């Protein structure tokens, strides 16, 4: 055999001499594929095959040989190979379900040893693949590339080309089509109140967005059950984006992401927060603007507001200075009082004295002179305070503060002597004062003061005993009322805009 080297029996040959004379006409090969011819004289010969073994083609090429002229016997060996009759195979590629032919499938042809004999064999439009001139033997076809839309099946398809095969060998290969239907699932979104998840919210509007941010569907609105259902979504990642919240609720700008799995329904819950409305919802009637009045100071009761009192460290400057300042007179150099014991403590409103209601609760403001000198050792015992409205005989002083004039011009005091610096009159402290400054207190029911002699500087009515300045009570009260009036007018004008 030309392909396998196998010895072939049944081949017939004829033997002719050099002149063409046929000596043997039908010498046949045995099971070893041999023909033995003995006792041939020397000379030239020719052997020609006249019949091939079954399944093989006749090899018409003559075999020429020569028997040499030599002593003894000479053995010659000649050989010839025959080719088997080639076989053929036709492969049909078809759909496993519909049996329709499949074009475009690619195969390789391998021999029995696994060696690739041919490659790039492709099925035609009828799904067929034909291979001719195959010697007798074992072969296999292996798919290397599937047709478009079909699964690759690399299982070898084995076949055999036999002797005397006169018709092509028919083979079939079925392939399964790819599942081109996308894997899908569905999603159900439920809209609820953030504070009460049992309360569903209809009327929420959403867009459906894929993983790339592309909007797939718009205007998806929750139904009466607060739900949106989207079926047949290919597997993947998506998001719901709220574009309109239900009435009375705050829209959520946070996308709601979810994943679709094959054959499954994904449940998604979304929450919105109720908008807090201001109370009252309905404003007041515009026909009654007078019901709301701006906060103002009532001008009918100015006496309820007490004027600011200047601290005792700066008696000459009021807290709220106006256009009118009380006149001040620089004190003269007072002389040393000759008889301080005859000076009674100043009292307010001596014309209508009465029993004091609560002298310990009212302390009049003190207006000190501009440059008073410190009294000499006034002692630790302070006199009791006498109410300026109803003075009477003072009780025995016990750790009380000295009496000072409340408002200039309201107490009947006389001017201090000009020979010395004036001191506040402190009743009941004679035991602690120096002999020259001891005052005397009258025990009569009239509470009259001793009038200094002509050699002394008298305290005139309506003047400060410390400085001798005239009282400015009227001017201070007038300035206070003017300031209150201007302040009230300013606020009324400001609130009227």
Image (cartoon, rainbow, N blue to C red):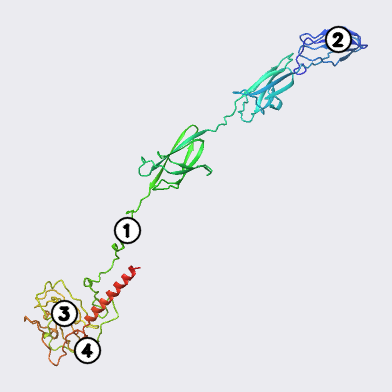
Mark 4 and mark 3 in contact? Answer it, CB < 8 Å: no
Q: Quadrant of the C terminus?
A: bottom left
Where is mark 1, residue-wise? 285
Front tag of 4 and 3: 4
Q: Quadrant of residue 109?
A: top right
**Which numbered tag is attached to residue 55?**
none
Q: Is residue 69 left or right of residue 185?
A: right
Marks 4 and 3 sit apart, C-alpha to C-alpha, by 21 Å
Vertical position of residue 273 compared to residue 332: above or below: above
Q: Is residue 81 left or right of residue 468?
A: right
**Which numbered tag is attached to residue 14?**
2
**Which numbered tag is attached to residue 333?**
4
Disc 3: CA contacts within 10 A as few (<14), some (14-19) or many (>=20): some
- Looking at the image, which is closer to me, 336 or 296? 296
Q: Earlier in the sequence, mark 2 or mark 4?
A: 2
Vertical position of residue 182 compared to residue 164: above or below: below
Vertical position of residue 379 compared to residue 51: above or below: below
Where is mark 3, residue-wise? 378
Q: Quadrant of the N terminus?
A: top right
Marks 1 and 3 sit apart, C-alpha to C-alpha, by 70 Å
Front tag of 1 and 3: 1
Q: Earlier in the sequence, mark 4 or mark 1?
A: 1
* Circle 2: element type: strand
Q: Is residue 40 visible?
A: no
The residue sitting at the bottom extreme is 455
Disc 4: CA contacts within 10 A as few (<14), some (14-19) or many (>=20): some
Q: Earlier in the sequence, mark 2 or mark 1?
A: 2
* Circle 4: element type: loop
Marks 2 and 3 sit apart, C-alpha to C-alpha, by 177 Å
- Looking at the image, which is closer to me, 347 or 307? 307
Q: Earlier in the sequence, mark 4 or mark 3?
A: 4
């Amino acid at each position: 055999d030309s392909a396998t080297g196998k010895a072939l029996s049944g081949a017939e040959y004829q033997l002719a001499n050099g002149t063409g004379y046929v000596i043997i006409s039908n010498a046949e090969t045995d099971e070893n594929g041999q023909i033995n011819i003995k006792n041939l004289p020397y000379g030239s010969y020719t052997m020609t095959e006249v019949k091939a073994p079954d399944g093989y083609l006749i090899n018409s090429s003559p075999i020429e040989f020569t028997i040499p002229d030599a002593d003894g016997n000479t053995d010659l060996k000649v050989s010839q190979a025959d080719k088997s009759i080639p076989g053929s195979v036709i492969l049909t590629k078809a759909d496993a379900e519909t049996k329709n032919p499949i074009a475009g499938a690619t195969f390789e042809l391998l021999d029995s040893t696994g060696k690739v004999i041919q490659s790039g064999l492709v099925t035609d439009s009828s799904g067929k693949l034909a291979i001719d001139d195959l010697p007798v033997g074992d072969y296999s076809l292996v798919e290397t590339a599937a047709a478009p839309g079909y699964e690759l099946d690399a299982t070898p398809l084995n076949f055999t080309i036999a002797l005397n095969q006169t018709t092509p060998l028919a083979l079939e290969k079925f392939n399964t089509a790819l599942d081109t239907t996308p894997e899908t699932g569905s999603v159900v979104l439920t809209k609820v109140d953030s504070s009460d998840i049992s309360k569903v919210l209809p009327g929420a509007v959403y867009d459906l967005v894929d993983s790339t941010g592309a909007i797939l569907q718009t205007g998806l609105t929750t139904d009466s059950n607060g739900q949106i259902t989207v079926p047949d979504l290919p597997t993947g990642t998506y998001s719901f984006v709220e574009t309109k919240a239900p009435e009375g609720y705050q829209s959520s700008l946070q996308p709601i992401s979810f994943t679709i799995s094959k054959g499954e329904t994904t449940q998604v819950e979304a929450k919105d927060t109720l908008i807090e409305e201001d109370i009252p919802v309905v404003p007041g009637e515009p026909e009654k603007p007078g019901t709301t009045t701006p906060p103002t100071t009532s001008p009918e009761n100015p006496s309820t507001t007490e004027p600011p009192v200047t601290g005792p460290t700066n008696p000459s400057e009021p807290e709220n200075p106006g256009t009118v300042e009380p006149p001040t007179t620089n004190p003269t150099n007072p002389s040393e009082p000759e008889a301080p014991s005859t000076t009674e403590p100043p009292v307010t409103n001596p014309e209508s004295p009465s029993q004091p209601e609560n002298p310990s609760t009212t302390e009049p403001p003190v207006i000190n002179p501009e440059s008073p000198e410190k009294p000499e050792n006034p002692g630790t015992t302070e006199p009791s305070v006498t109410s300026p409205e109803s003075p009477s005989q003072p009780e025995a002083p016990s750790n009380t503060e000295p009496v000072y004039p409340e408002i200039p011009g309201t107490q009947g005091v006389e001017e201090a002597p000009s020979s010395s610096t004036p001191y506040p009159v402190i009743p009941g402290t004679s035991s602690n004062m120096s002999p020259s400054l001891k005052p005397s207190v009258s025990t009569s029911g009239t509470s009259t003061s001793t009038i200094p002699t002509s050699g002394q500087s008298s305290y005139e009515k309506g003047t400060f005993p410390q400085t001798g300045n005239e009282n400015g009570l009227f001017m201070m009260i007038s300035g206070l009322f003017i300031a209150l009036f201007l302040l009230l007018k300013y606020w009324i004008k400001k609130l009227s805009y």
